Amino acid sequence: MISLRFFFFTLLAFLALVQIVGQAIISPIDPFAPRQEQRRYRLDQLFNPHLISYKLNHINSNPVYDVMAFGNSSILALSQENLNRYGRFFNVAVPGSSFGSSVSLALALAERDRLAPVVVIMVENFNHFTQQVPMLPASLRWRDSAAQVFSLLVDENVPLREKLRFTARMVKLEGELFVRFFNPGVLQAHLAVIMADWLPLAAPGPRPGLLWDGYNPDGSGGGMTARTFGKIAIAPRHDQPQVLPGVLVHDVKRLAVLAARHRIIIYESPVEPASHAEYAAHPIPRVTQLREMFFAACTRHGLECHAAPLIGQPEEPNLWMDHYHPPAPVLGSWIDSLLKQPPRRTRHAVQ
């Protein structure tokens, strides 16, 4: 009969093995390299820690890029084609990411001298700001979490309540990630990328019903397809009890240390023109206050920040497929206009 001690030892060993496979084992093959379509085709099935790891693999195995973009899915369509005149471009964005996560990634790359001279960082539109806890790969997340908790504790401008809430979120995230790495779908997607040469499960190509058709070699998302067609409804605005303004301002302060060696351009993500017009006509005090705090922090730390632009006109045909993901051509054109300007401090007009 198997002893209880042996059973628990075996169980712990199994749990450790799953966590190692799930969090630490990343294929050394670069999915964004040439002739890696099978791997890129599978990347949109991964969740953030794995996808970020593969993007970091690519960045670390190539010469330093000239321009990098950080953010969530609303900047994912930005590609080399949109910014050709500025040299080599790589899109580091991952769906569901946060401003704090982008800051942590940029700092990690700068520490390794892998950060581009020009950095474009998206912050969520403040009408829909969510402020998720950074979901980085384990090798970065644990170190970054410890550094963030310490820096928050010593920052007198962050209220104690926010410090405690953010720390609690990090602890909760670790528990959720630990459980999620046992999810068969997560493990299957992870191993499918690692073993793509041995498991050619599908041929690259369009996949109806998905928002993104895989990834491109420059890290950007493939062609975007609409889930629904027709006139886009104005996006509702919900309560934002999870937002910690002091932590957001602290993230701006963390990012400011890079400004001496890199041009940092921060922009608030635009929304579909009809929603933009509605929000401008009926501002919400808490949103206005959050935006004001953010841009005041940008000014205080000498960063170049831009409020959400109006991309398109309300009630006129446009290329938007939903309220939150700007079309690559018009987003690229606007960011191109920012890059052409000489570096400047905050441009803030409440939108």
Image (cartoon, rainbow, N blue to C red):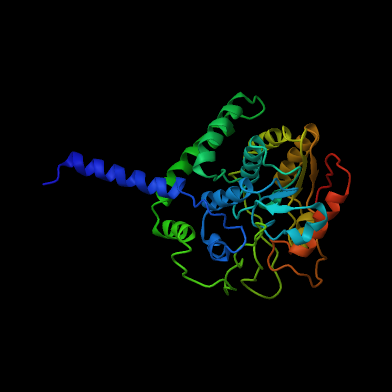
Can I make out residue 277 in this image?
Answer: no
Percent of width and height locating residue 133: 56, 43
Residue positioned 80% across, 61% down in the render: 311
Residue positioned 54% across, 39% down in the render: 140
The one nearer the camera, 144 or 26, is 26
Going by the image, does 145 lie left or right of 325?
left
Percent of width and height locating residue 274: 76, 64
Going by the image, does 16 lie left or right of 189?
left
Percent of width and height locating residue 54: 56, 52
- Whether 293 is drawn above or below 81: the answer is above
- Whether 114 is drawn above or below 220: the answer is above
Disc count in the image? 0
- Whether 243 is drawn above or below 230: the answer is above
The one nearer the camera, 137 or 315, is 137
Percent of width and height locating residue 187: 42, 56
Can I make out residue 113 in this image?
Answer: yes
For residue 184, which quarter of the picture?
bottom left
